[in-house]
Amino acid sequence: WRIVKTMGQRLTKLKPVGGFCAETGGAITLFMASALGIPVSTTHTITGAIVGVGASRRFSSVRWGVAGGIVWAWILTIPASAAIAAFAWYLGQKLF
């Protein structure tokens, strides 16, 4: 529920037509990336589409601090996951 609330209310206020446009834009982006063989995240495309819908209404309607927090979470998740997996592998080697 927190993610849905953040995406639909905290990032920018979405009305049903805006949600439809964001979903359509995200889906088209996924189809194009798939056709080109580019692996992309559904979450990233939908988030970008929601920001695009909000910014097209009014640039200031997007809460850029929330958007920046999401981007930083994406950036930090990759090395954090790698470090945790490396530590788990190390423990697995020592224990088994």
Image (cartoon, rainbow, N blue to C red):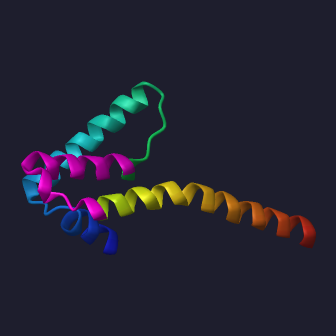
Q: Which residue is outermost to the top?
A: 36
Q: Residue 51 or 21: which is nearer the viewer? A: 51
- The residue positioned 19% from the left and 68% from the top of the image is 9
91 in magenta: no
Query: Quadrant of the image for the N terminus?
Result: bottom left
Which residue is found at the position 40% from the left and 26% from the top? 35
Viewer-nearest residue: 21 or 52? 52
Question: In the rendered image, which quarter is residue 68 located in?
Answer: bottom left
Report the front residue among 88 and 10.
10
Over which residues does the magenta segment extend? Answer: 44-65
Q: Quadrant of the C terminus?
A: bottom right
Question: Percent from the top left, x then y, of residue 64?
Answer: 25, 59
Image coordinates for residue 14, horizontal then vertical, percent: 13, 60
Tell me residue 27's x, y (percent).
28, 41
x 47%, y 31%: residue: 38
Q: Position of residue 81 (x, y in %)?
A: 62, 61
Residue 71 vs residue 15: left or right? right
Task: Please name the predominant secondary structure of the magenta segment in the image.
Answer: helix
